[in-house]
Image (cartoon, rainbow, N blue to C red):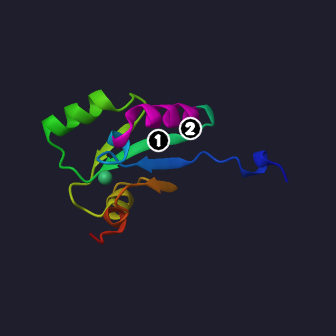
Amino acid sequence: MNSDDFKKNIVIALDYDDTYTLDPTFWQGFISTALIHGHKIICITARRKTLENQQELATTLPDCVDIYFSYDEPKSDYAKRNGIAVDVWIDDMPGWIVGIT
Ligand SMILES: [Mg+2]
């Protein structure tokens, strides 16, 4: 079995505050590598979907990253409710994913 046997397009949900913002240059490299491998990066933040927040994230994150605002709803519930199938979560506060904060 070689590594190609594991080929799958992975959907990775990347947190914004204190994850992406800790080192945007690092994550931009990570996102570029993910794209080369056929994977998709989305951002699910617990922030509220205000115009200010939309503008901040849209100008900070690479254009290829779709942005979602769960607004305090557990992120996994939000994703399910919106038909977003996440394979891998990256978050400095994993409690936000399952609603344990
Ligand atoms: Mg965070």
For the point 35% across and 32% down, the residue is: 61
Determine the image quadrant of residue 38.
top right
- Please give left or right for residue 72 compared with residue 34 in the image: left
Say whether marks 1 and 2 touch (CB < 8 Å): yes
Read off the residue under disc 1. Answer: 41
For the point 77% across and 45% down, the residue is: 4
Residue lying farthest to the right in this orientation: 1
Read off the residue under disc 2. Answer: 34
Is 25 part of what is drawn in magenta? yes
- Please give left or right for residue 12 compared with residue 60 in the image: right
Q: Residues within 10 Å of mark 2 (few under 14, many from 20)?
A: some
Q: Measured from the top left, where is residue 98 in percent x and y?
A: 35, 68
Query: Is 97 above or below relative to 53?
Result: below
Q: Nearer the viewer, residue 93 or 99?
A: 93
Q: Nearer the viewer, residue 28 or 10?
A: 28
**Callout 1, which amino acid?**
Ile
Instruction: From the image, give the main secondary structure of the stretch colored magenta.
Output: helix
Magenta-colored span:
22-35
**Mark 1: which secondary structure?**
strand
Q: Measured from the top left, where is residue 5 in percent x and y?
A: 77, 50
Q: Nearer the viewer, residue 64 or 25?
A: 25
Q: Nearer the N terminus, badge 1 or badge 2?
A: 2
